[in-house]
Amino acid sequence: MSESLLIDVNASKEEKYKALIPQINALVDGEEDVVANLANITAALKEAFGYFWIGFYIVKNGELVLGPFQGPIACTRIQKGKGVCGSVWAEGKTLVIPDVEAFPGHIACSSASKSEIVVPAFKDQEVAMVLDIDSDELNTFDEIDQKYLEELMKSVSKFL
């Protein structure tokens, strides 16, 4: 297991993802503890991209419950269909939100959050958790983020 990431800070977003995803997969390979893996994934994403908030919400007892994250304190529980994370859980698809203030029913865990991407992970064809990434800038996330984060979440689904 590597103890540091090899990411060119001057690389494009896509180049960073191409370098990062294999390193994350190597980092979690062989580790059976889900919390340890999710903690390392959030740390790797935070180190590579420096986004405002990165974390997981895990489906437990009929609600999303906060899991490992990097950033300021966060909402602890989210109901299905509520906010961006709850909507991703209900719809089972990634949502890219350029301006969270324009999203109906957005849950403002932090007023500093301006844009967001939320990506589901599946177990037995059901959403088991979501990866939530917030930026303190508008229009941060795009199809490049969606493509590589969905790829990452398919890897995450393998150890759920």
Image (cartoon, grey):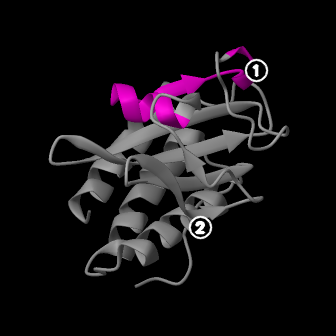
In the figure, 68 relative to 36: above or below? above
**Residue beneath disc 1:** 101
Q: Residue at x 66, y 21 (%)?
A: 98
Q: Secondary structure at mark 2?
A: helix
What segment is highlighted magenta in the picture? 85-102
Instruction: Residue 35: name its quadrant.
Output: bottom left
Mark drawn on residue 43? 2
**Labels in figure, total:** 2
Nearest the viewer among 153 and 147 is 153
Residue 52, given in percent of the width and then of the height, sits at: 74, 49
Q: Is residue 77 magenta?
A: no
Quote the CA–CA distance across marks 2 and 1: 27 Å
Q: Give the residue type that dot 1 points to.
A: Glu
In the figure, 117 relative to 62: above or below? above
In the displayed structure image, the side of residue 35 where residue 106 appears, left or right: right
- Please say whether residue 145 is visible from this viewpoint: no
Could you classify mark 1 by the number of other residues whose Cα lies within 10 Å: few (under 14), some (14-19), or many (20 or more)? Answer: some
Residue 102, given in percent of the width and then of the height, sits at: 71, 14
Q: Secondary structure at mark 1?
A: helix
